[in-house]
Amino acid sequence: MGLISGMVMGMVFGIALMAGWKYMMGHRSRKRVAKAVDIKLLSSLSKEDMKKICGENCPEWISFPVFEQVKWLNKQLSKLWPFVADAAEAVIKESVEPLLEEYRPPGITSLKFSKLSLGTVAPKIEGIRVQSLKEGQITMDIDLRWGGDPSIILAVEAALVASIPIQLKDLKVFTVVRAIFQLSDEIPCISAVVVALLAEPKPRIDYTLKAVGGSLTALPGVSDMIDDTVNTIVTDMLQWPHRIVVPIGGIPVDTSDLELKPVGKLAITITRANDLKNMELIGKSDPYVVLHIRPLFKVKTKVVENNLNPVWNQTFELIAEDKETQSVIFEVFDQDIGQDKRLGIAKLPLSELVAETSKEIELRLLPSLDMLKIKDKKDRGTLTIQVLYHEFNKEEQMAALDEEKRILEERKKLKEAGVIGSTMDALDGAASLVGSGVGMVGAGIGAGAGLVGSGLGAGVGIVGSGFGAVGSGLSKAGKFMGRTITGQSSASRKSGSATPVNTQENGGAKPL
């Protein structure tokens, strides 16, 4: 009897144990499934959804990465880099060298590569973000970092100075590259690629300059000149909204929709400045204002001598190409013998402006737009301006684009003829020329003198109503975009100024 009861009790206990184990495993499985569902729901929440749920107590460790990691691509890139580097070196030398010559500062007569090697260290892609912002296009943002070992030597020449080889060392690049692929229904299914550097976060290119077998003191200010040239090329050619359009596949395609076009015109009146910093030991500063949207298209006010509260009341017109991302930069300088000193700088994003609405704005002048590197954070005064933004219609947009292109070509011809030292000199007033419909490119061109008004003499550089007309087509731009120009003789700048901008008085423009 005892044996039978023991067996029954053992069987009951075993069945109960098995049933309990099955229930426990089923319960754990259901909990895991429930947690997986919750996690999946949480992963689909946006940052705004999390803020609604957590309120102001959203944990700091919660992040919303927008870039996907691509470790596999970095491995492949490191293997391909020797071949990519060889091909890239030829492309860079062919495409960048003309830009160095085009954007060359006035103090340098020649700027070319004497050696270019990208080294053995491949760039690293921190992440990629893929978006479909427009039908028929794929937009890819690539977070790029490169701290390689390139060997880059520039041959720099200046007047009365032999060529000095200058090496770029410790080159580091931090930027986000935007690549837009235009899709097509023919193999290879991509008709063109648009490449640009995003403005935010701002591209960073760090390097140090060292003279090979010489000293940088042989060319005073050469480091600043090269820095300005590099920054200008990046800002004016590669930084979004500016872009490079590359057709692909060998099939002729229309890339006009991908190219940058003028979208509007700004009429900016520089009214006055108050409480400027005095940079003179004797007397007061002689301030003037330089303003631009693109670095190549700069215009400048007249100089008000010996005054820290100057009044200008001068109106300029600048072309905008992307209202959402571009800004107007205002720089106040003190005219001086040698290099002019910057008194302050301010920035006005175009996104803050309302079309067809005039607005008076007081801008606070800063020592630099990048205040993290500035020790002297004292007040630099204020600049008061009046701004009116006009949005182009299709006809105005195409007319402005055609005239802008033609003016750029005329400026290049002037440089090739040796009339000006750098395309930067010629293009300083191009935006204003297009914006205000000026029917001339350089003083004396129409008259056959071929001289640009840069203070070469009292009779040179006269910007008359009939002088310097490049063609009848430019006067058409004046009809739809503003006023025609009649100016006076160009004011001579003091020698050695490092601010190669043109003078524009009473709405006029005078090329340097």
Image: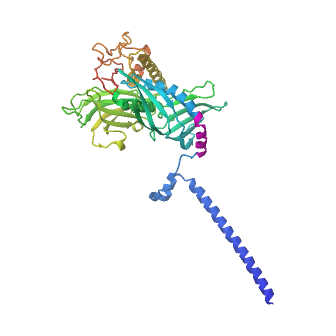
Q: Is residue 26 magenta?
A: no
Return the residue found at the far left: 282
Left or right for 175, reference 253? left
Image quadrant holding the C terminus, namely top left
Where's residue 308, x and y in %?
Answer: 22, 34
What's the magenta region?
71-83
Where's residue 297, x and y in %?
Answer: 39, 26
- Rendered residue at 28%/15% (across/down): 457
Where's residue 384, x and y in %?
Answer: 29, 35
Residue 159 visible in image: no
Where's residue 274, x and y in %?
Answer: 25, 36
Classified by dominant secondary structure, the portion drawn in magenta counts as helix
Left or right for 509, reference 5? left
Return the residue found at the far front: 213
Looking at the image, residue 137 lies above or below residue 510? below
Asked where in the image residue 29 lies, by quadrant, the reply is: bottom right
